[in-house]
Image (spheres, coloured by chain):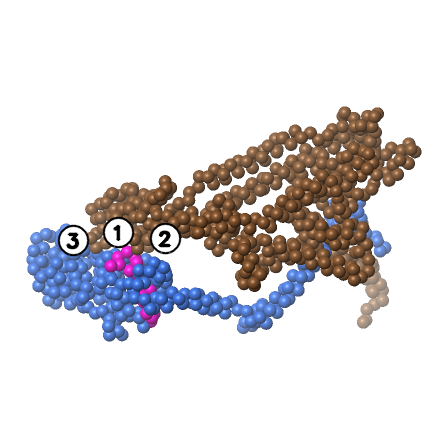
Amino acid sequence: MMLDQSQTKAAAERLDVEPVNAARMRKPLYEKRRKIFPKRAEGRFRQFKWLVMLVTLGIYYFTPWIRWDRGPHAPDQAVLLDLASRRFYFFFIEIWPQEFFFVAGLLVMAGFGLFLVTAAVGRAWCGYACPQTVWVDLFLVVERFIEGDRNARIRLDAGPCTLEKITKRVAKHTIWLAIAVATGGAWIFYFADAPGLLKNLVTLEAPAVAYTTVAILTATTYVLGGLMREQVCTYMCPWPRIQAAMLDENSLVVTYNDWRGEPRSRHAKKAAAAGEVVGDCVDCNACVAVCPMGIDIRDGQQLECITCALCIDACDGVMDKLGRERGLISYATLSDYAENMALATDSGAKRIDPRKVRNADGGFADRVRHFDWRIIFRPRILLYFGVWSLVGLALLYALLTRERLDLNVLHDRNPQFVIESDGSVRNGYMVKVLNMIPQQRTILLTIEGMPSAVMRVSGHDPEQGRSFAVSVEPDRVTSLKVFVTLPKGRLAEAEHGFTLVAEDLSGEERDVYEASFNLPGGSTR
Amino acid sequence: MADKNKHVDEISGVETTGHEWDGIRELNNPMPRWWVYTFYATIIWAIGYAIAYPSIPLVREATKGVLGFSSRAEVAVELANAKAAQAGQLEKIASSSLQEIIADPQLQQFAVAAGESAFKVNCAQCHGSGAAGSKGFPNLNDDDWIWGGSPDEIYQTIAHGIRYAGDDETRVSEMPAFGDMLTTDEMRQTAAYVVSLTGTPSAPELVDKGKQLFADNCASCHGVDAKGNREMGAPNLADAIWLTGEGEQAVINQMKAPKHGVMPAWLPRLGDETVKQLTVFVHSLGGGE
C-alpha cells in the first residue's frame, strides 16, 4: 500500500449511520407464549355455558346416528352428505346438486344471524357457541380433572419432572387425543352410512380418505383446542378484528363498571376508615384468574375478549361474599356505561368518585342507568332480523314449491337434422328425466304441438307414436334418446316447435320443455 | 451510544425498529412463535420436497427425485386402471352377439359410448363428427343403406370395408361408365326419369324415353322400380337421399364418370370388440334396422 498518510486520515471521518439490525437492538423472532391456567368459575353464565356445551357437542356427535326411513332406494341416515352419488339428505329433505343454492342460502342466513347476534349481544358466538370455545372448554375440563384447579396446575407446571407429573401429563394428553379422534371420527360419519363406516373403521377396511380425514381433524382438534387455545382466537381468527364494525354503542358487551369499582383497593375497610374514596373493586384478580384468554377485563374492551362472561361469574361471587350488589362486571352497553361514567366523573372533569352514583343510603342513585331490554329492538337489529327472515322465508318457499320431477332436453346439434328416404325430417333429442324421489315412477312422455310429428324413444315400444310410458329409476336421472320425425308435406308445422311433456302417471306432477325443430336450409324455429 | 436510537412507543410500550417516516414509527413486535415455526417447517418441507420429487432443472432433464415420481407413469397407471375397469364389459362384448349387446341396455350404453369415441378417432374424417357424411360419403344417421342397415350388415361393412384392395371379403360394386354407351341426349332422358321418381324433372317430355332407357341399362342393378339392390350395393334412386349429389346434372355426371368411394377394412386395425362397438354406435344413430 503506497497511500499517503494524510489522505487516509481524511477518509476516516465517521459517518452518521446505523445498521438497521444492529446487534444491540435485535430481538428474538418469536415471542414466547405466556401460559394461562384458567381457574374454574361458578355461576349463572358458567351454568349456561355447560348447557350450551352439552347441546352443541351432543348435536355434533350424535346427529349422524339418527336414522330416517326413506324406503329401499335411499339411505336411512337422517343427515348425510353423499358425495359419491351427489346427494344431500337432511331428514325429510333431499337435495340434488343443482339445488345447492339451499345450502348457499343457509350460509347467507348464518352470516346475517351472526351479524344479528353480534349487534345485539356482542360476541356471544365467540363466548358460547364457537367450536374453538366449546372444545377448549372440554379440554379444560379434562385438564382440571387430572391436574387440579389453577394453583395445582401452576405448581405442577413449575415443579420438577417427577413421575407424578409425567403420569398426569401423559393421562391428560391421552384423553385429549381420544377426544380429538372422536371429533375427527364423528365428522366422517356425516359423509357415509355411520354404522357401516364405524365397522369398517375398526376392522381397518375403511377407505384411506376416511383415515386421512380422521387424522387431520384429530391433529387440528388436538393442536387448536388443546395446545394453542386462546392463541387461535387472538392470532388466527379474523372475527375479533371484524367485530368493531359489528358492534355499536347499544350492543351488550362484557364491561367492567369502573364508575362504581374505582378507585380499587385491596384494603377497602382500612382506606375507607382513613377517609379515602374507595370503589367496589377489591382488586382480588378473580376476574383475571378465570379468564380463558388470560386478560384483565378491567382494562376495557380488547380484541382478545371473547365475552364468555366467566369474569362476571367470578366477580359476582366475590360481590356476594362482600355483601355488595352484583354487576361490578356485567353485560352493559357502551352508552349506559358512558352515561354512568359521566355521572361518576362529573363528565370527565374529575377522577372517578363512586359516591356520586350512590344515594345517601348506599343504593344506586336514580340517575344511574341500567340495561333496558327495549334497546334490543332498535332499527339496526330489526333490519338484520328482517333480512335474515326474508332469506329464510324465500328458502322455505323454494323448498315447499320445488319440483321432484324435472325434464332436461339437449337438442342434437350434430347433425342438426336428418332427411329420411321418404323426405321426412328427423331431429334427435337427448331427454333426461330427473326422478328426484326415492321411488320408481312411470313417466308419460308426450309431444304437444306439431300434430303430424311422431316420436320414437330408443329401446322403448311401440315403434313410434306421440306418447310413451317410460319407467324411471328411483332417485336417478334416466337418459332417453328421442327422435321426432315430421313428414315431408308437413314441414311448416315446425315453425312453432313442440312441447315435450313429462307427467307422472300416478300423481299430478309434470314438467314441460319447449323444444324447437330444425329443418334443412336453416328454416328453423 | 448503545441506546441512542432506541425508541419505545409510549402508547403500547413496545420498542420500535428505529425507522421513522414523517413521524410514524414501526413497532418492533416479535412474530408469534407458531408463525415462525410454521415458516421454518415450510422451508424444511421445501428441501424434503426437492429431494423426494423431480425439481431441479438440469441441461437435458430435471432431477428425478428419490421417490421416482413421474406424471407420465401416473397416466400409464391410470390408463391401465381404466382398461382394467372396463375389462368385464369388453369381455362381455367379445362373447356376445350384436343382437345380445343391443338387447342389454347397460351393455348397449357402454358399446355406444365406446363406439362413439372410436368413431371420432377413425371414422369422422370421412363421415363427419356427427356421422352426417357429405357428398360421396354416406350419412349414417338416415334410414337409407347402400349395403344394409341391420347390425350384421353394418358389422360386415365396417369389418371388411368397401372396394378395399387388401381384404378378400370386402364389399365390391362398380357402376359402368355410360359415357361411351349412351348419347348425351339419352343420358339426359334417363336422368329426367330418375329425377321424376321423387320430384319434378326439368323437361317432362323426356321421361317416357328415359323410362325405357332405364329399364334397358340400369334396372339390372338398381331394380325395375329403381329402389336399388343391397346385394349389389346399388343405391335406391327412388328416395330423397342422394350420395353424389341431387338433380339431373348430378345424375348425368355419375352416369358419365361414376365415382366409387373406398372404405378401409377396420377389423384388422381395430379388432373385433371395437368394430362391434362401432356397429352398435352407428346402429343407434336413428336409422338402424
Q: Kindly tell me whether residue B140 is visible in this rendering.
A: yes
Q: Quadrant of residue B36?
A: bottom right
Q: Magenta segment: does it hold B99?
A: no
For the point 28% across and 63% down, the residue is B99
Amino acid identity at mark 3: Thr
Point out the image quarter for the C terminus of chain B: bottom left
Is A420 located above or below residue B50 in the figure?
above
Instruction: Give the letter of the chain under mark 3.
Output: B
- Three-letter code for the amino acid on which mark 1 is drawn: Pro
Q: Residue B240: percent from the left, percent from the top?
A: 20, 54
* The magenta stretch spans residue B274: yes
Residue B111, quarter of picture: bottom left
The Cα–Cα distance between marks 1 and 3, rounded to whole angstroms, is 29 Å
Left or right of A463 in this view: A45: right
Magenta stretch: give its range.
Answer: B269-289
The residue beneath circle 3 is B198
Chain of the residue under label 2: A
User: Which image quarter: residue A22?
Assistant: bottom right
Give the residue at mark 2.
A479
Q: Is residue B253 above or below residue A57?
A: below
In this picture, residue A392 sits left or right of residue A521: right
Assign a secondary structure to mark 3.
loop
Report the residue marked by disc 1.
A462
Residue at x 12% of width, y 56% of height = B193
